[in-house]
Image (cartoon, helix red, strand yellow):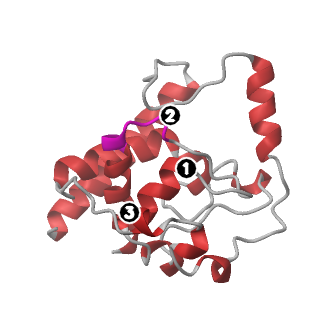
Amino acid sequence: MTGITQKLVVALAVSLVAALLLAACGGGPSSPSTVQQADTPAEETQHMQAHEHDDEHAHDADEHMSAMGHDVPEEADAMLNPIQADDESLVAGAALYAANCVVCHGETGQGDGPTAKELEKKPADLHADHVQDNSDGALFHIISHGRPDTPMPAWEDVLSEEERWHVVNFLRTFGE
């Protein structure tokens, strides 16, 4: 990706994040295919309680040095990304990230989103080697199935397969 293209993608991502945050604060519409919502306040409370923790525990990078350290099956680790990481995919991935991932991982992917301080385990810094060293298939598996014993939820019932691959492509921009 050229420097100008990368800057354009980042500018679009920042614009999308700002627009989505304004829409969220103003009660604007959100797409049911990209935002998971609780059906009742009790379900929302249960979801939040399941992920409420203190921020005294840092994300243990040594625990996650490989796809196998993330409990990713070998066949998932070997999966090839069917979506080319072109400008279209990166823009789609940035929008999906802004709508679904920023709250925990933060705008810049450093695990410092608005809810991160409430979590026992800090969300992964998406720039870190223990994330970027994973194959696309491993990242797809983690996004799809979540991570047991962490606040990372499964997204397979929220995002389509194609959307999850776009997110994988966007996550790679944090390693550049």
Q: Where the N terminus falls, by quadrant?
A: bottom left
Q: Residue at x 80, y 59 (%)?
A: 120
Q: Amino acid at mark 1?
A: His
| Residue 70 percent location from the top left of the image | 58, 68
Label 2, label 1: how many angstroms apart (C-alpha)? Answer: 9 Å
Which residue carries the number 3 mark? 137
Circle 2: residue type: Asp
Location of residue 117 by image quarter: bottom right
Label 3 SS:
helix
Residue 61 is marked as: none
Q: Estimate the x, y position of residue 28 in percent, counting from the top left.
A: 49, 19
Residue 82: image location, x then y, percent: 22, 54
Q: Earlier in the sequence, mark 3 or mark 2?
A: 3
Instruction: Measure the C-alpha gap from mark 3 to mark 2.
Output: 18 Å
Magenta residues span 156-163
Label 3: how many Cα within 10 Å (few below 14, some 14–19, many 20+): many
Indicate the amino acid at tag 3: Gly
Instruction: Write down the residue under mark 2.
Output: 157
Residue at image coords 84%, 53%: 53
Q: Which residue is mark 1?
A: 145
Q: Name the residue nearer the viewer: 47 or 8.
A: 47
Residue 147 to residue 72: above or below: above
Label 1 sits on a secondary structure element that is helix
